[in-house]
Amino acid sequence: MATTMGDMQLPSSFDGLVTDGGKSIVYGEPYTTADGTLVITVAKVRNRGRGSEGEPLETVAKPLGVFVIKDGDAQWRPAFNADRASTLGILTGMLAAALGLLAIIRRPPWPDLTSPGWSPAENPQWWRGRR
């Protein structure tokens, strides 16, 4: 049995969809595109802070993606946050550079060219025997 929402008929597969008890997942108003595709947006909503009366000070919504229904075939298309992906890439590069620098400081990759007893600090009289 199909559910009606306004003048739209929703597929019966949506009857089983339930949001969680905290109402943090919100489904947007379904709309139909020109080619007959049904699109339903999905967002995660949370409240930040509490006022003196207990009401939320700020409500923040983060888009999760959309359900796309075309010709009876439903697909989930997640939202992609390019800022988050680029920040993760930058942090990964900085961590790799820091670990590489730490490895070089601990043990340089170039060979150790000093031999014991050769430097003037270890043997201040080393040059006198060469005259």
Image (cartoon, rainbow, N blue to C red):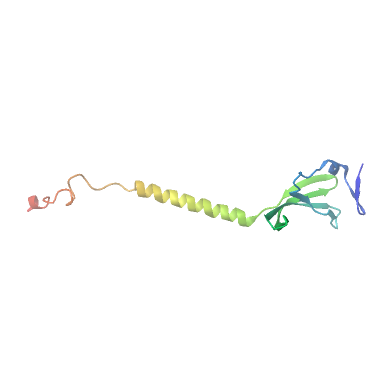
Question: Image point 87% across, 45% down: which residue?
Answer: 11
Find residue 81 and report its horizontal and vertical position in percent.
65, 55
Percent x, y of residue 57: 70, 59
60 and 31: which is toward the camera? 60
Q: Residue furthest front?
A: 52
Along the horizontal axis of the image, is 15 left or right of 92? right
Left or right: residue 52 compared with residue 96: right
Residue displayed at 23% across by 47% down: 114
Q: Quadrant of residue 86?
A: bottom right
Task: Name the foreground residue: 131 vs 85.
Answer: 85
Seen from the viewer's position, the closer of residues 82 and 20 is 20
Nearer-the-camera pick, 35 or 76: 76
For the point 84% across and 44% down, the residue is 14
Number of numbered discs present? 0
Quarter of the N terminus within the rendering: top right
Which residue is rendered at x = 40% and y = 49% of the image?
102
Relative to 51, residue 100 above or below: above
Expressed as whole percent of the image width and height from the top left, the position of residue 119 reads 18, 50
- Horizontal and vertical percent position of residue 83: 62, 57
* Left or right placement of residue 11 versus residue 84 in this view: right
